[in-house]
Amino acid sequence: MPSPSVLSWSMIAVALGFAGLAVLGVLGVRVWIEVRRLGLQVARTSQRISEATGDLERAATDLARTSGSLPAQRR
């Protein structure tokens, strides 16, 4: 029969092991949530960049169209 002190130390070790796993699980969930949030921000930013690129292309096209109607500059 094991002595009571060995039994209590083993129970403490098992409890600390479970507590460590619980902490790792909570931290893993928090990291997953932040990664999802970052992914959504990257997607939104990518969409905004695409829209800005389209606006810039339209402005350049309009400018190229109207440049022929401008008077030539003398040097």
Image (cartoon, rainbow, N blue to C red):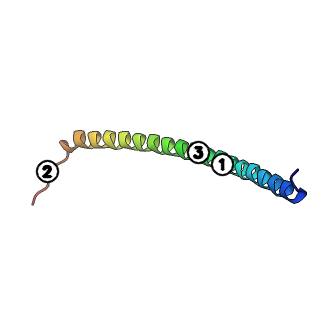
Q: Which residue is mark 2?
A: 72
- At 88% from the left and 50% from the top, the residue drawn is 1
Query: Which quarter of the rendering shows the C terminus?
Result: bottom left
- Mark 1 highlights which residue? 30
The alpha-carbon separation of the residues under discs 3 and 1 comes to 11 Å
> Which quadrant would residue 8 be assigned to in this image?
bottom right
Label 1, label 2: how many angstroms apart (C-alpha)? 63 Å
The answer to the question of whether label 2 and label 3 lie on touching residues, with beta carbons closer than 8 A, is no
Q: Earlier in the sequence, mark 3 or mark 1?
A: 1
Looking at the image, the residue that sits furthest to the front is 1
What secondary structure is found at the residue carrying circle 3? helix
Left or right of 63: which side holds 3? right
- Residue type indicated by callout 1: Arg
Sequence order check: which comes first, mark 2 or mark 3? 3
Q: Residue shown at 73%/48% (left/top)? A: 22
Under mark 3, the amino acid is Arg
Q: Nearer the viewer, residue 52 or 69?
A: 52
Q: Position of residue 62 (x, y in %)?
A: 28, 40
Residue at screen point 14% across, 55% down: 73
Q: In the displayed structure, would residue 65 be above or below residue 15?
A: above
The residue at which mark 3 appears reads as: 37
